[in-house]
Amino acid sequence: MNPHEIRCQYFSQEDLLAAGCLDMNLAMDAAEESMRLHAEGDVLFPEKIVQIFKEETQERINCLPATFRSKEICGVKWVSVFPLNPVQHGLQNLSAVIILSEIVNGFPVAFMEGTLCSNIRVGAMGGLAAKHLARPDSETIGFIGSGEQAKMHLIAMKTALPKLKLCRVGAKTEAEEEQFVAEMSPIFPDMEVVGAGTSLQKATEDADVIVTATSAQAPLLKAEWMKPGCFYSHVGGWEDEYAVAKQCEKIVCDDWETVKHRTQTLSRMYKDGELTDDSIHGNLVDLVLGKIPGRESDEERTYFNAVGLAFVDVGIAHAMYTRAKEAGKGSDLVVQEKMIFEHEELKDWVRL
Ligand SMILES: NC(=O)c1ccc[n+]([C@@H]2O[C@H](COP(=O)([O-])OP(=O)(O)OC[C@H]3O[C@@H](n4cnc5c(N)ncnc54)[C@H](O)[C@@H]3O)[C@@H](O)[C@H]2O)c1
């Protein structure tokens, strides 16, 4: 082997799935560790680069890098969001790839499908929040939205709250609800998964846990549907009326400073003067590190909103890569066999 050969591993989504990477415990552990390392100053986390192709639709591709010094790993998520894909083309709105490099010589070690990791990260952060903010005896969960994020969130919530036994889902159409039920029921033989016939009230009223994960920009979730003791995980943009957050005893974000400059309900409330910094209980990392209390009574209503911390994606991607490699999945990708001017054929290949 030429000493200048560079090889890395390629992992398709199917390689990762077959290696057991759709494992919320793996992801939640990696997310927790990533947040702890970030708090300790171990993580390089530059600003993301955003390229928006159409302002009206917000079609975009973002580039989100991060480095874990202690793990000697640098990664980047290259993620595209095309919000009209599901409605106009029947395609997913988010797709991603991830590259991981070591930082000893600076060479790539993995090129992997990244939608799985990205969606797992969203679920894992919600699952971690549920561990601290939901009643551990929660039995019913209600969804508004039945898309990719909702499905992953159900896996995360069931992992964090194993006593869940009834899931109701409300979406824009009954066909979407039926698809959710058909895809999720086989994964959870001990849970009943039912459609709410597009009644968002029926889906969420009396639930111990509520998740909204929609492409809508409207106050879909009403405060009166959220019973005392309920934990609410807000995944999408503007999805709940202001009274929802106002009646919650604890509001936690993945990173409030980031959330407040975005367009979710909490961000809108902040800009409208309906909520201040003091209304926020803290960030998820504060719960993880035990700096602030989680749920303190059975009656508390709790609210979690995450907009995404890309260093967590890189942390989870690294855990998935390690597992997939150990499982012998993926294929060898030869990046280069030798250095450019070592190729004997170069005189024939070069174009002058
Ligand atoms: N917080 C994060 O870190 C994060 C990460 C990725 C995506 N997201 C957001 O999560 C949301 C969901 O993403 P997805 O990939 O699951 O989308 P998706 O297109 O797969 O699903 C959207 C769902 O919203 C439902 N919906 C839309 N309008 C509705 C209405 N008026 N009433 C009821 N249901 C309605 C649809 O029926 C569908 O089930 C998006 O807003 C996306 O931007 C958040």
Image (tube, helix red, strand yellow):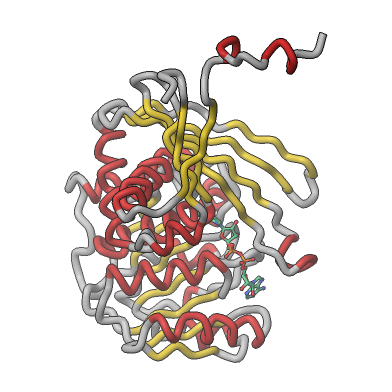
The image quadrant where one finds the N terminus is top left
Residue depicted at x 61% and y 14%? 344
Q: Which of 36 and 294 is in front in this view?
A: 36
Q: Quadrant of ligand 1?
A: bottom right
Q: In which quarter of the image is residue 85?
A: bottom right
Q: Quadrant of residue 101?
A: top left
The image quadrant where one finds the C terminus is top right
Q: How many numbered discs sit on the rendered protein?
A: 0
Instruction: Give above or below for 131 relative to 143.
Output: above
Residue depicted at x 30% and y 58%? 128
Q: Can residue 31 be seen in this view?
A: no
Q: Which of 138 and 335 is in front in this view?
A: 335
Q: Is residue 325 visible?
A: yes
Residue depicted at x 31% and y 52%? 323
Instruction: Give above or below for 287 relative to 346.
Output: below
Q: Which of 233 and 176 is in front in this view?
A: 176
Residue depicted at x 41% and y 41%? 314
Instruction: Name the spot of residue 62 as percent of width and height, x first.
Output: 61, 39
Instruction: Name the spot of residue 320 as percent of width and height, x first.
Output: 36, 50
